Every structure is written in C-alpha cells, then in structure tokens.
Image (cartoon, coloured by chain):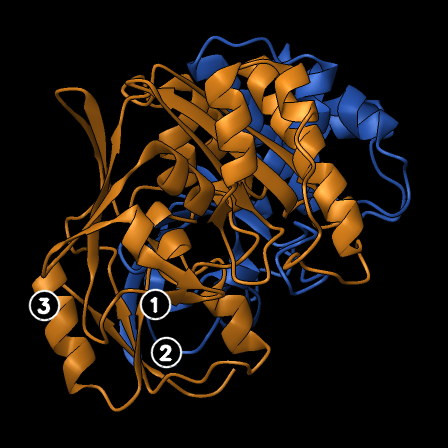
Chain colours: A orange, B blue
Amino acid sequence: MYETTFHKASSADDAASKLGAAEEGKLLAGGQTLIPTMKARFASPSDLISLKDASISGICRDGDSVVIGAMTTHAEVASSVDVPAYLAALAGGIGDPAVRHRGTIGGSIANNDPAADYPSACLALGATIRTNQREIAAADYFEGMFETALEEDEVIISVVFPDADKAAYAKFPNPASRYAMVGVFVAQSGGETRVAVTGAGEDGVFRHEGLEAALADSFTENSAASVAVSADGLLSDIHGSSEYRAALITAMAKRAVAAA
Amino acid sequence: MSKISLTVNGRSISKEVSDNTLLVEFIRENLRLTGTHVGCDTSQCGACTVHVDGKSIKSCTMLAVEADGSQITTIEGIANGELHPMQQAFNDNHGLQCGFCTPGMIMAGIDMVNRYKASNKPLDEAAIRGELEGNICRCTGYHNIVRSIADASTKM
C-alpha cells in the first residue's frame, strides 16, 4: 500500500471540508473495498478521511420508512428489528460475518460496484439517498459502473427506504467469492411493481421493464418465467456469459417472487 | 504517522504507527503477537480474524489507525489459565490438521457462538457452515471444524 495520511472526520460536513482540502482524498467507511483496492495499488489516495466518528450511523423508523445511517454496518442492518425482513436478509447475505461487521451501506452505494447488493434494493424500493448537500432519488443516483450522482465533496448521510407491501431479494452468488453474479430485487408498493437487477448489467444496476410489466399483471413465478430476458447489454466474463446471466435473471426473479 | 491507543488482550498500548499500517501488521510486527496469521491477504480466507470491540473482523482489511480506542482480542488473549472452550473443542474433535487457519477459525467460532447465544438462535450444523463462509481451511474438509464449534457452543 502506498503512503497515505489518515484523518478522522467529526461530522459529514467536516469530512466534506477535509476532502476538499486534500490533494487526492478518499472517504473511508468500512474499508472492505477501499483497503483491498489500496493494498493492490489500484488506488493511492493522498489522504483518507475516516467517517467512523462522523455520527452518521444508526437505524430509525420514520413513519412508513426506515432510515439507515451511512456508516451502519451490514451486520447491524441484518439484525435490526426496525428493518423489514427483505432488507435485513439482503444485508445478512453480503460477504461473510467478519466483512459484515465492517462494511457499511454508505460505502456500498458510494462505490456502486456492479455486483453490489444494496443498489438493487435502493432502485426497487424507491429509496432516497440523503447527503450533506441534498436528497437524491435512487432513480437519479446510480449512473453506471462505479459511477454515481455524488459530487466530489458530497458525503452520504443516510438512505431512506419506504416500506414495500411485499418484496424480496434473490441472488446467485459467485461460487468462489460469493458476490452477486446476478441479484434480483422485486418489490410491490402502492400498486407499483419494481424489479431491479444487479450483477448483470454492463452499466451496473438497472430496472427490468419486461419483468415489471409481467409481475404488475400477475405477481407469480410463472409470470416472471414467461418474460424473455435479452442478453443484450449484460456482462460476459469467465464466470458466465451474457446469455447465462440472462437465464439467471429469470431464475432469480422467480425465486424472489416466491420469497416475497 | 499517528499515535494510537488501544487495548490488546487486556493490555493498554500506545504506539506510533504509519497511517498505512494494516492492523494485522501492527499485531504481528509491532506487538509480536504472531498467532494471528496472514493467509490470502485479500479478506477471503479469515486466517487473520481477530475481535475488535467483541466482533470478528479481518485484520488484513483494517488499518491500525482505525483501531484507535478499540479493544482487541487475538488468539493469544482467549485462554484464561486453561484453554478456552473453543480451543479445547478443536483439540478434542481434531478440528485442525496443519493449523494455519486455526486461530482465525477459533476467533470466528467464538464470535458466532456469542452472537447466536445473544440472539437466542440455534447454532445448528447448517448455521455453522454458513457462518464459516469467510474462513477457509485447505486441509480438513471442514467436518471436524464444524463438530468442534458445535461442541464448544454447548460449553460456552
């Protein structure tokens, strides 16, 4: 790992100002992606600004929504009674127990890895991302692989998830590394049906209109299975071709519908 | 460089460390506690698992400066005059062969038993295998590791 200078931020605004003052600074949340990336020398930030003491952790209910602080770990989300079961299950399936004790929701969505789990929940549940500057609808937030709407010195404070009438997430983990080769989050809320797919798209997480239309019509496994999922625009690598991922989207959509 | 103050196995420690020092480097090279191992060095294998404030974490994927103010327990800190029930269970059930992954297995095992007991959930064989997701053993085929943790869970 290259040399870096470590700072502790006392608040999100403090983090933003330290980030602005740094030559090439990076925010450090749980570090479960950033530290391996730095160890591999794929990233060499001059300064690391830790959000550990920024008081942006914790879970609370706000009417028909759950508000999850950016520095809340996956383990905390997975075991919280305030978090709906479909979201707790997603958090409890990320990485492994030790990773879940460090990794955070804010870190996950700030990084926007194309195989991350949380982005699918944000899109399918119509989440709002609150930052130190504004509120961003999930639909406007995820801009492509590792790309988000966040500005240079913008810090995520929390993510607000409106409760769904029914929802579930199903993923096909990579057999060795366990990240989502394909993950499908289905949600029905107030008559609207959303289906978000992670792990599969060349541009990261996306909503699948065909599955949404079929499931809005009939929320059944057969209905999901009747949709022809195109391989166009899907990832193709040594772990699976785009055609294989298209087939996995159908399979995971069926599992998610059955579990919802 | 930053000065960090933390507790390791009950001992208060204050030391200067480089900001890019990993927690596992600090534990092994500064404190000479070499029971915590570095296996894959990519947060896959779990040989470097230690407890930070009572929770299992991979010390190859955390900076030492992030542990400032924390309580750390390593494999050297769990026996209290006699072996910890998890260590004894690995001994009794032949839960190791080469032993390289064992410190991490034991720290992960203690953490999972503590969590399941705290939330009153049954730690059955399927649960143990799921919880061992982040700990890799290349010798045993896991059967005796699972038996060891199940055995210890009745004695902790």
Local crowd size for mark 3, using a 10 Å CA cut-off: few (<14), some (14–19), many (≥20): some
Residue B85 in sight: no
Whole-number angstrom distance, CA of label 1 to CA of label 3:
19 Å
List x then y, in percent, for residue B117.
49, 14
Contact? badges 2 and 1 (CB < 8 Å): yes
Residue B27 in sight: yes
Name the subunit of mark 1.
Answer: B
- In the rendering, which numbered label is found on residue A14? 3
Say which element carries label 2.
loop
Answer with left or right where residue A174 lies relative to residue A2.
Answer: right
Nearer to me, A112 or A47: A112
Residue position marked by numbered label 1 in the rendering: B65
Name the subunit of mark 2.
Answer: B
Q: Which of marks 1 and 3 is in front?
A: 3
Answer with left or right where residue A26 lies relative to residue A111.
Answer: left
Residue position marked by numbered label 2 in the rendering: B19
Residue at (16%, 65%) from the top-left corner?
Answer: A9
- In the rendering, which numbered label is found on residue A185? none
Say which element carries label 3.
helix
Outermost residue toward the bottom? A23
